[in-house]
Amino acid sequence: MARIHLHVPRRHHRSGFALLDVVIAGVILAIGLATIFSITSKSLKLQRDGEIRVMAAGMLDNILSEVLLEGPADYPDLHSSAGRGDFPYEEFEFRVRISDPGVGEPYLVLATVTHETGRSFECETLIAGKLGEEPDPIRIPQEPIDREARYEEVFDR
């Protein structure tokens, strides 16, 4: 008697595993992309926050420099104590409060800057008043400086 062997291909099991591999790979890819988008979103938010902080610090520095330059006693007569910032600080409002403590004591200066988002930044410092009636000195050298000759001296050595 002759035996007949039937060979049954097992393709169906292999194609099922390939489909399962593709589904798992798709899930892993989706998780990876979601993570990347989340990190990107957070980094953009942090970058914007950093830009606002740098701009606020720059505006505070400008305000306090003007108070120092003009003198705390004269500043309120020459500049507004509150308002909206000029270029490049259009997104900010400012307020300056100067307290006169009395004779011989430094002025207490509080500068506050508020961004359109509602975040406020402030800096408080002490600034001495200008003494005497003399105008600010002219700050130019008595003799012109010959920079080229100075460089030649350095390189000739």
Image (spheres, rainbow, N blue to C red):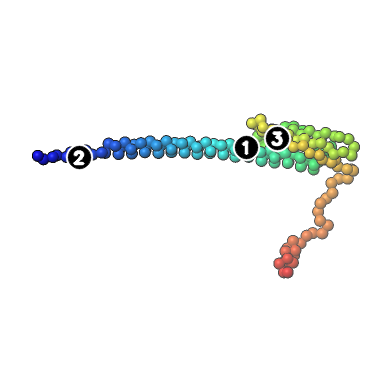
Q: Quadrant of the N terminus?
A: top left
Q: Are the residues tagged 3 and 2 within 8 Å (C-beta)?
A: no
Q: Residue at x 44, y 36 (%)?
A: 30
**SS at mark 1 in the image:** helix
Left or right: residue 146 compared with residue 134: left
Label placed on residue 121: 3
| Disc nearer the start of the sequence (3/2) | 2
Residue 115 is situated, as x and y percent measured from the top left of the image, at 66, 33
Circle 2 residue:
7
Q: Are the residues tagged 2 and 1 within 8 Å (C-beta)?
A: no
Q: Quadrant of residue 149?
A: bottom right
Circle 1 residue:
49
Amino acid type indicated by mark 3:
Phe
Classify mark 1: residues with Cα within 10 Å, few (<14), some (14-19) or many (20+).
few
Left or right: residue 139 compared with residue 51: right
Q: CA distance from mark 3 to mark 2?
A: 81 Å
| Disc nearer the start of the sequence (2/1) | 2
Residue 21 is situated, as x and y percent measured from the top left of the image, at 36, 38
Q: CA distance from mark 1 to mark 3?
A: 13 Å
Q: Residue at x 75, y 35 (%)?
A: 111
